[in-house]
Image (cartoon, rainbow, N blue to C red):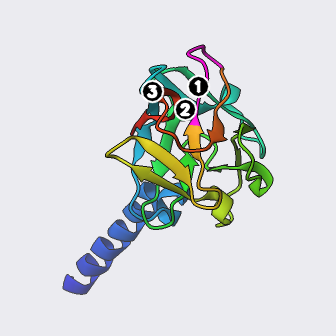
C-alpha cells in the first residue's frame, strides 16, 4: 500500500509539472513576464497587431496588459521573449545602423537577440550593436527602433 501511494504522489507531481511548465518557461532562465513601458510616451512595447510571424515589427501601444505586450526578460541568456508569440526581440539581420526598426524572430541565441537592461537609467541596449531601444513618437503603433544610446527621453523604459 505504501509503494502504491508513493508512486501515485510521484506521478501526480510529474503530471503537475508538465502542465505548469509551458515551453517558454521551460526554456527561460531567471525571467518574468512584464510590460516594458516607455517613460516618455507612457506606451508599452509590443509586436504590432499581435503577429506571431518572424520579422514582425515592434511598436508601441497604449498599455492594456495583454500577452502581446508582455515580455519575459531572461537574465541568464539576455533574451527578451514576447509572451504571445514566444519569439525573441531582435535587431533584424544584425544591422548595426541607427534607426533600424526592431522586430521578432524565433529565438536562436544570436547576439542580435541579446539585451541588457539597466534599471538605474532605464536603458535597454542590444549586446551586439550596443545601441538602445528608442521610440520617436508618443503615438499608438509608432515603431520601436535602435539608436545610439544617449539617454534621450524615448530611450528610457520601465520594466
Q: Residue 40 in the image: x percent, y percent?
A: 45, 22
Mark 1 surroundings within 10 Å by alpha-carbon count, few (fewer than 14), some (14 through 19), many (20 or more): many
* Mark linked to residue 45: 2
Q: CA distance from mark 1 to mark 3?
A: 12 Å
The residue indicated by pointer 1 is 60
Q: Position of residue 26 (x, y in %)?
A: 49, 64
- In this view, the residue farthest toward the bottom is 3
For disc 3, the marked residue is 65
Question: Going by the picture, which residue comes out furthest to the top?
Answer: 139
User: Is disc 3 in contact with disc 2, using a CB cutoff of under 8 Å?
Assistant: no
* Numbered marks: total: 3
Q: Of callouts 3 and 2, which one flags the residue occurring earlier in the amino acid sequence?
A: 2
Q: Visible in this render: residue 22?
A: no
| 12, above or below 85, in the image | below
The N terminus - image quarter? bottom left
> Is there a contact, CB below 8 Å, between mark 2 and mark 1?
yes
Left or right of 153 on screen, residue 57: right
Amino acid at each position: 500500500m505504501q509503494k502504491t501511494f508513493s508512486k501515485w504522489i510521484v506521478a501526480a507531481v510529474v503530471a503537475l509539472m508538465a502542465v505548469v511548465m509551458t515551453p517558454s518557461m521551460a526554456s527561460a532562465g531567471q525571467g518574468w513576464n512584464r510590460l516594458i513601458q516607455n517613460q516618455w510616451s507612457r506606451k508599452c512595447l509590443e509586436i504590432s497587431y499581435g503577429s506571431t510571424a518572424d520579422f514582425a515589427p515592434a511598436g508601441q501601444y497604449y498599455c492594456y496588459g495583454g500577452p502581446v505586450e508582455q515580455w519575459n526578460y531572461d537574465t541568464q541568456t539576455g533574451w527578451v521573449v514576447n509572451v504571445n508569440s514566444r519569439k525573441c526581440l531582435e535587431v533584424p539581420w544584425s544591422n548595426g545602423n541607427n534607426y533600424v526598426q526592431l522586430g521578432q524572430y524565433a529565438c536562436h541565441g544570436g547576439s542580435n537577440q541579446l539585451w541588457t537592461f539597466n534599471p538605474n537609467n532605464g536603458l535597454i541596449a542590444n549586446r551586439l550593436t550596443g545601441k538602445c531601444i528608442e521610440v520617436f513618437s508618443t503615438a499608438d503603433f509608432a515603431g520601436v527602433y535602435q539608436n545610439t544610446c544617449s539617454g534621450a527621453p524615448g530611450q528610457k523604459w520601465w520594466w
